[in-house]
Image (spheres, coloured by chain):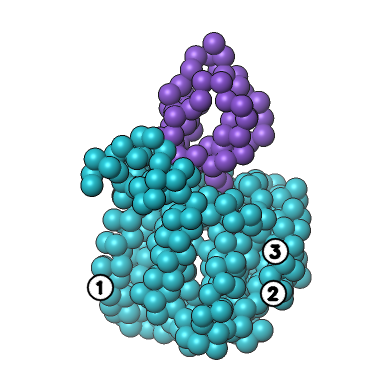
Amino acid sequence: MEMTVLVDGRKKKFPGTVKNAGELLAKLGISREEALVKIGGEVVPETAPLPKNPSGKIEIIRVVYGG
Amino acid sequence: MADRKEGAAGDGICSKCKSRAVMRQAYSGESLCKKHFMRMFEDRVRKSIREFSMLKPNQHVAVALSGGKDSAVLLHLLCDLKQRLPMRISAILVDEGISGYRPHTIKTAKKECEKLGVKLHIVTFEKEFGKKLDAVIKKRDGKKSEGRCASGAKRGACTYCGVFRRALLNRAARRIGADKLAVGHNLDDTAQTVLMNLMRNEPARLARFGISGGVADGEGLVPRIKPLVRTPEKEVAIYAMLKGIGIHFMQCPYAEEALRQDVRSVLNKLEEKYPGTKFRMLNSFVAMRPALMKFASDEAKESSGKIGACRTCGDATSGTECAACRLEKEI
């Protein structure tokens, strides 16, 4: 089983499945404090379960410093 | 109650209305839907404005706008607040001259100002200091002796940028007759600044770090206000996204040079492990600030460091020449 996610617009694949968005971030080595997760275009909390076969894309947007 | 919150969080359900949650606040134990998150966010900013007496009716507020999330969200919030608290709002953007980065953010800032009917004033390093930041850094990297601290280490790009930006924002705010200069500093910025000043053993500088105004207001310095001081950085990004505010998510190419990035990363790790750390740091700083200000004031008296006018540019300074003029000579 392989998952594909978009990290700052770039496709990233990794093996295995994860329970929720928080686990996904941890697997990718991204701090929960520094990223937002969108599923099918909707912002979701890190505790929200990840669908096994998401109909929409899974995106991770890093919150950059400054602004 | 605690069970409901735990259960709701696990299911991604709003702790208040059982709708789909868009975020979870580990520090409060709540998950919130779009409606309740937006309400909480806006209430907290208004409360901060009241708590630190940031605004009075009919003031002219200049928003330091960069095109990034914090300042864009701040501009929108103040424009909304204008309906309850009458005020005049302008925006000031500093173009430091960072190729591949600043042009994009200027475009975004212009669009947001047009949308909100806010006048945007753009000021540039090149016009005020004779050089773009890119050129300053190129010169620093090419010379062996210039652009170095007393220790011999190279000055970071953020040192030049921070000093010049602060000077320029103040000059521009004064020029347009602003009563207040609103900056988008959020909770994370504040916690980072507190820690950085402790790490550098700079208590006087920490005392000067104000939330609403500083130690030397009325001496040629336009008081700065920070309405996002109690708002975590990540929540600013969520709010911007949910409200459809046009922002860019590019990072300044010089950001990696800064100590702040390392401090940010450490604090984020601590926040993940011990939720509420950043809030506790802010609250400690607020509680200690009167003592810090007394310390800074005593120290200034001892060194006869009264606020006066810079001998070169006339801006307010505690010495004979302001930091911007000193650095300007270096470049």
Q: Residues within 10 Å of mark 3 (few under 14, many from 20)?
A: many
Above or below, B330 against B277 in this view is below
For mark 2, name the chain.
B
Above or below, B207 against B178 in this view is above
* Same chain? Circles 1 and 2: yes
Q: Which residue is mark 2?
A: B118
Above or below, A16 against B9 in this view is above
Chain B appears what colour? cyan
For mark 1, name the chain.
B
Chain A appears what colour? purple
Which circle, 1 or 3, is nearer the viewer? 3
Percent coordinates x, y for residue A67 in the rendering? 59, 57
Q: Are marks 2 and 3 in contact (CB under 8 Å)?
A: yes
Percent coordinates x, y for residue A13 in the rendering? 60, 19
Say whether residue A54 is left or right of residue B176.
left
- Residue found farthest to the top: A1
Disc 1 or 2, which lies upstream in sequence?
2
Amino acid carrying mark 2 in the image: Val
In this rendered view, identify the residue nearer to me: B138 or B164. Answer: B164
Say whether residue B21 is left or right of residue B299.
right
* Same chain? Circles 1 and 3: yes
Q: Which residue is mark 3?
A: B112
Q: Which residue is mark 1?
A: B291
SS at badge 1: helix
Query: Is residue B123 visible to the viewer in this orientation of the structure?
Result: no
x 37%, y 65%: residue: B206
